[in-house]
Amino acid sequence: LAKTTQPVSMDSYEGQEVNITCSHNNIATNDYITWYQQFPSQGPRFIIQGYKTKVTNEVASLFIPADRKSSTLSLPRVSLSDTAVYYCLVGDISTGANNLFFGTGTRLTVIP
Amino acid sequence: GAGVSQSPSNKVTEKGKDVELRCDPISGHTALYWYRQSLGQGLEFLIYFQGNSAPDKSGLPSDRFSAERTGGSVSTLTIQRTQQEDSAVYLCASSSRPGPVFEQYFGPGTRLTVT
């Protein structure tokens, strides 16, 4: 299972676009990239998943360069309610679930 | 439909006592996971179940920790002879199949405090 590296924390003002990058240098051919969001006192929840290029849903966009050694979660026009910890997770369908590695995540603080 | 539920929501116990934490996954989800999250820290994977079997128990921090799942549904995480370092939030999640590709649905967690 590929390990990931993310910034520990980020601050942003309301209304700005926020980009959080995750490094996964040893990503394997069949690995997918998944992002979760965790609010205080809650369990994480799924945000978005992708394999290559760009994926967009109603919440966020995920940009994956051709070499797939990193990925960037983009949150458009953040609000105070986007203050949370964001986790990047990498793995494939055959990995099973051995030692799922969420890491410490990126703590995003949105400032009024 | 109902999500993942966990009980109790909070548990305070004395050092040396045994505790049982319960997880009810989403109906039909074959995979169930247990994680531990210490204050201000990330998620530490403990164990997962595919059906009633746990293919890999190496994530359990010590032999005081054990888990079982019966009927492919409810799971119990047991911590024997609790220690203060066991204090954390214990999170349970389920997914339709095991593995990072499949969306995990998390419960609200059980906050364990060992005094």
Image (tube, helix red, strand yellow):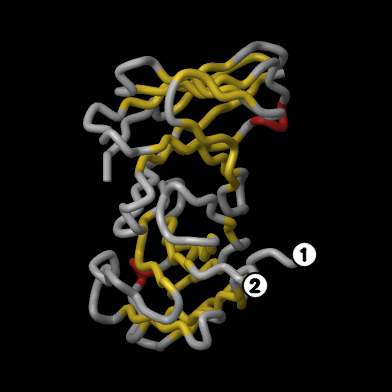
Query: Which residue ends up furthest to the top in the rendered image?
Result: A16
B15 versus B43 height, above or below:
below
Disc 1 target residue:
B1
Q: Residue at x 59, y 22 (%)?
A: A61
| Camera-side residue of A31 and B79 | A31
Q: Residue at x 34, y 38 (%)?
A: A31
| Camera-side residue of A60 and B14 | A60
Query: Which residue ends up furthest to the right in the rendered image?
Result: B1
The answer to whether residue A61 is left or right of residue A92 is right
A83 versus A99 height, above or below:
above
The mark that comes first in sequence, 2 or 1, is 1
Label 2 packing within 10 angstroms: few (<14), some (14-19), many (20+): some
B17 versus B103 height, above or below:
below
Secondary structure beneath label 1: loop
**Disc 2 is attached to a residue of which chain?**
B
**Residue B36 x %, y %:** 42, 61
Residue B60: name its quadrant.
bottom left
The answer to whether residue A82 is left or right of residue B59 is right
Q: Residue at x 27, y 68 (%)?
A: B61
Q: Are marks 2 and 1 in contact (CB under 8 Å)?
A: yes
Disc 2 from disc 1: Cα separation: 9 Å
| Residue B14 makes an appearance in the image | no
Label 1 packing within 10 angstroms: few (<14), some (14-19), many (20+): few
Disc 2 target residue:
B27
Q: Which disc is residue B63 wearing?
A: none
Marks 2 and 1: same chain? yes
Q: Amino acid at mark 1?
A: Gly
Number of numbered markers: 2
**Residue A68 x %, y %:** 33, 23
Residue A83: name its quadrant.
top right
Q: Residue at x 72, y 18 (%)?
A: A112
